[in-house]
Amino acid sequence: MSHGSNSCYRSRSTSSKPGGPRVPQSITIRREITQLPLFLQLFGVSAVSMIVPSMHGLVANDHLASRAFLYAGVLGLVAFTLIAIAHAGRKPLDGALGPLLSLLSAFVFLPVFFAVPFIEALPTTRFVNVYFEMVSALTTTGATVFDDPNRLSDTLHLWRAQVGWMGGLLMWVTASAILAPLHLGGFEVTAQAEPGRADEGSGVRVGRITPRQRLLRTTQALLPIYVGLTLLLWLLLVIGGETALVALCHAMSVLATSGISPIGGIEEAQINVSGEAVMMLFMFFALSRLTFSKDTVTATQGGLMTDPEFRIGILVVVGVPLLLFARHWIGAFEVELEVDGVRALHALWGAIFTVMSFLTTTGFVSEHWIEAQGWSGLRTPGLVLMGLALIGGGVATTAGGVKLLRVFALYQNGVREMDRLVYPNSVSGAGTAGRRLQRNGAFIAWIFFMLFAMSLAGVTLLLTLTGAPFDAAMVMSVATLSTTGPLIEHAADAPIRLIELGIAAKAILCGAMVLGRLETLAIIALLSPNLWRA
């Protein structure tokens, strides 16, 4: 009798039907969640993430913000659960259009959800300002309409940095899982297929893996790295003397290249040159994806020291500060007869850190940057900072801009064309991959440059039509399309007050930030009939 009871018990606990094994409930729920649309998954993660600022507000006695984030998170989870239940049982579509469209929808519509607890905790501002703030954070742009950091509570500053950090993680994951298979986001330079289309036979090489499986595997691989690097930088900044909240916000901003600061910039922080040096080390992760992963096609070119993006980035970080320092040195001799060696070293370091920061589109300025300008009598080098932001960082990183790989492709094409002027019948010795980069890669890179220039001209024209001066419109266009928000404060002769702009101008800037984050080719790919048919 006991044996029969045990058999019946085993049958009930391990099978869902006679003769079949029972799937554990937790595995079933997890499987159903992974079958949901990507946008709905991101919405659920966003709702759960609001528990962090809610707990911070509770600890910091900011009960208004704590309740706002708690209520918004709970309501978001309820909505997520109801939609997930209604969606249960539906067969998911495994085409390439869904994830790409979900990514665009996330940058456009998720900031609306992010803005709800923000405006509840700060009822003295308008919703359009908060929406702009959240779009800027999620796209890792870092532009802010609140010039005075004291207007926001510590909880709201934490939320801004956290949204930017989540936006950086989103780009880390989707670059490999969504953009790379479609040859977008810079991958079109080294791909054999056209942008927006997969290689022929790619399913044979990588196996029959769906976009959802690819997203899950990429997230499982990169999330621990991203979180670990953030915690390590936060710990190092705290050891260096920074307060816990400011150090955490700066750590998240450096990893996400958002440039968001709760105190108005690191020049106001309690860290010195050593703290800036630590932050600069972590900015190298925005120069090349090979610094943290080898899961994309650009990793087939060899190790990190042979990676063209990393080498060009090092060349710019070393070369541009030396040129600026030479100009600073000459200017110092023009102003004063004696040159202080300590001030000269401070000027050199300020140039190195600031160049690295704007090349990776982070936008932090060294505490010695203004001192270097005053030491030399040089005017604000806004064009230099704008040029660095336009170049941008590496492909499939959190950095924005044109990307170093496209610059390298155009450089290789230019060198090859000059060789052909001298030796018209010569054959390139760069190998198969190198010749493809010199021809097709350079051609597609040039197309992207033209599209980027047209976008820059279009955004500038639209901003001038709203009443903005031309120079301010140009700075704002470069800052938003390159996702380098601090340019708005440091590139112009005087900081531009975004809060004084009209609703139309802010809407244009929001669209430019989304366009700069996803890039023009991805938007064009969404209009491709082939992608919709697939």
Image (cartoon, helix red, strand yellow):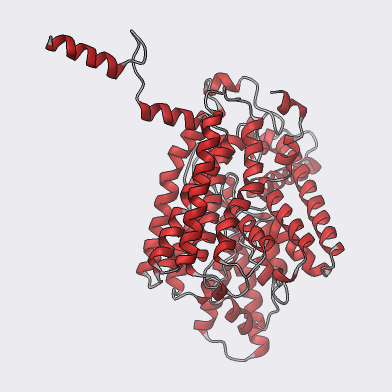
Q: Quadrant of the N terminus?
A: top left
Q: Is residue 465 left or right of residue 492?
A: right
| Residue 114, above or below 318 | above
Residue pushed farthest bottom? 337
| Residue 257, above or below 270 | above
Question: Looking at the image, which is closer to me, 222 or 68?
Answer: 68
Residue depicted at 76% across the width and 68% down the height: 501
Residue 322, x across and y down, in percent: 60, 69
Residue 430 can be seen, yes or no: no
Residue depicted at 73% across the width and 63% down the height: 476
Residue 99, x across and y down, in percent: 61, 34
**Quarter holding residue 319:** bottom right
**Quarter holding residue 347:** bottom right
Residue 520 can be seen, yes or no: yes
Residue 226, x across and y down, in percent: 45, 49
Residue depicted at 70% across the width and 32% down the height: 196
Residue 76, x across and y down, in percent: 53, 46
Question: Looking at the image, which is closer to me, 353 or 255?
Answer: 255
Question: Looking at the image, which is closer to me, 208 or 151?
Answer: 151
Q: Quadrant of the C terminus?
A: top right
Residue depicted at 54% across the width and 50% down the height: 168
Residue pushed farthest left? 2
Q: How many marks?
A: 0
**Quarter holding residue 533:** top right
Residue pushed farthest front? 1
Question: Looking at the image, which is closer to me, 192 or 173?
Answer: 173
